Image (cartoon, rainbow, N blue to C red):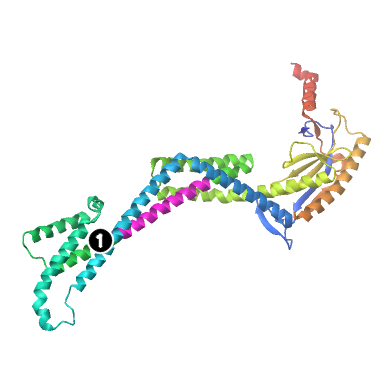
Amino acid sequence: MHYAVKSGAELEGASVMSGEIILVPALGTPLGATLLAGAGAVVLAGAALRMVEAWRDEKRRESQRLQAEEKRATQAWQTYQSQQQQISQVLMSERVQLQEQLQNLALLSREASESQCSPTDSITAQAEGFIQRADEARSEHFAILKSWIEALPDALFDDKDLPFQRLRKQWLQYCSRINSGELIDDLTLVTFKDTLQATLEAHERALVQRQEQLEGRLGRCERCLEQVLEYEYLVQQLAPESIQGYGKTLDTLKQKLLQALKQGEVSVGLLDLVQRQFDQIATQIDDLLQSRAVQTATLNRLQHHMEAQGYQLLQDEIATQSVWSIPGGERVIVQLHPDHRIATQVVHERAVYSKLALSADELAFLRQQEDRWCKDVQQVLKNMIKDGFQYAVQFERDVPEENISVVVVESVDELLAADELEQKSDPRALK
């Protein structure tokens, strides 16, 4: 059965609420972990700490699973990832080709060195064969260098942003001079070879850097998308007001990423912006999730121990404010505050609606049930402490009769019927 509550200002003299008790988290205990959860700190130990961690970890695993599914289903991400991976493969292929060419060039250098005069040859032999060997070496070097240059990828010479067009132009000039019968000294060819080798090595390093930047940016983009999607699911575990605020911010970040992915241009600046804005709210969401974990574990154990004492929950499921029937009669409202304080109030309920003050019998019965609740809550408190929830009684009183707050607790149908009857009996309502 669902219950509605009206304040004493609305229904003065209808019923009574007293037996107020407030339980607060007890800090400074030698055992347990102090968790900063939401609006306050709470000390947990043993089973309580394990329950909180289990709930929180379960929600994170579920959020990670859901974000992975959504990421796989996001066409913009799949297209962008495929394009970037293809570019990375092309860069890797170019690197492999360059490395092969550089190895060939190193081999050319060794062959050129071996073709020089042996130090064991006599001075006369060196002198006699110098001119012949120089001509042969020059021709051999030119032929090997020509073959090696022609094997270079055409893409190197087609890219205007690279220096290879200028080097090829210089090489073609050498070829023209040689074909016309001009002799080009070996030092010129060696210098050209060294210049080309240094240029290729610099280009190979640039390819490595570009590939690392591409893969790094792709990895950052994926992590940003995963974080935003995961926390979109995590905030669903929070209170409605938190869902609305943080959910809107996360959706904005997601749309920025998706728009960039669709355009195929995800800049480092955008990733920095998304990451910075995400970090600003992620810590807050983590704190609220921690608070919700503590809250859920507290409510679950509170329900378990109250039901063990014979109390019945008068709503579909336990919430931060719940109404219980006390064994034998009357009701107790239990409220878990954001700072994890637990406040309780015993409430009198009449079978029928009435504005009459409580009779002596009703007041005596209420006091009797207040006493019962005061004793039972002590046992609930002991059991909660055994679980690892470090609570202590901060405030407890029986409210003096003249200061009793007045409320009425009825079924929804009865309350609506009573309001309708009151309006019909009010002369002002007939005007």
Dividing the image into 4 quarters, which one contains the N terminus? top right
Magenta run includes residue 204: yes
Residue marked by disc 1: 199
Q: Does 106 sit left or right of 320 as displayed?
A: left
Q: Nearer the viewer, residue 300 or 423?
A: 300
Q: Is residue 236 above or below residue 212?
A: above
Q: Residue at x 74, y 39 (%)?
A: 317
Instruction: Using the rendered view, name the quadrant where residue 116 is placed.
Output: bottom left
In the current view of this chain or complex, which residue is farthest to the top?
Answer: 431
- Give the SS element for disc 1: helix
Q: Residue at x 11, y 75 (%)?
A: 130
Magenta run includes residue 172: no
Residue 200 in percent (x, y) is at 26, 60
The amino acid type, in three-letter code, at marker 1 is Thr
Question: How many circles with numbers are drawn on the protein?
Answer: 1
Q: Nearer the viewer, residue 276 or 74?
A: 74
Range of magenta residues: 202-228
Residue 251 in percent (x, y) is at 52, 40
Instruction: Using the rendered view, name the quadrant where residue 93 is placed.
Output: bottom left
Q: Is residue 195 above or below residue 406?
A: below
Residue 177 in percent (x, y) is at 8, 60
Dividing the image into 4 quarters, which one contains the C terminus? top right
**Label 1 neighbourhood size at 10 Å, few (<14), some (14-19), many (20+)?**
some
Q: Does 151 sit left or right of 423 as displayed?
A: left
Q: Residue at x 21, y 69 (%)?
A: 111
Q: Residue at x 88, y 37 (%)?
A: 329
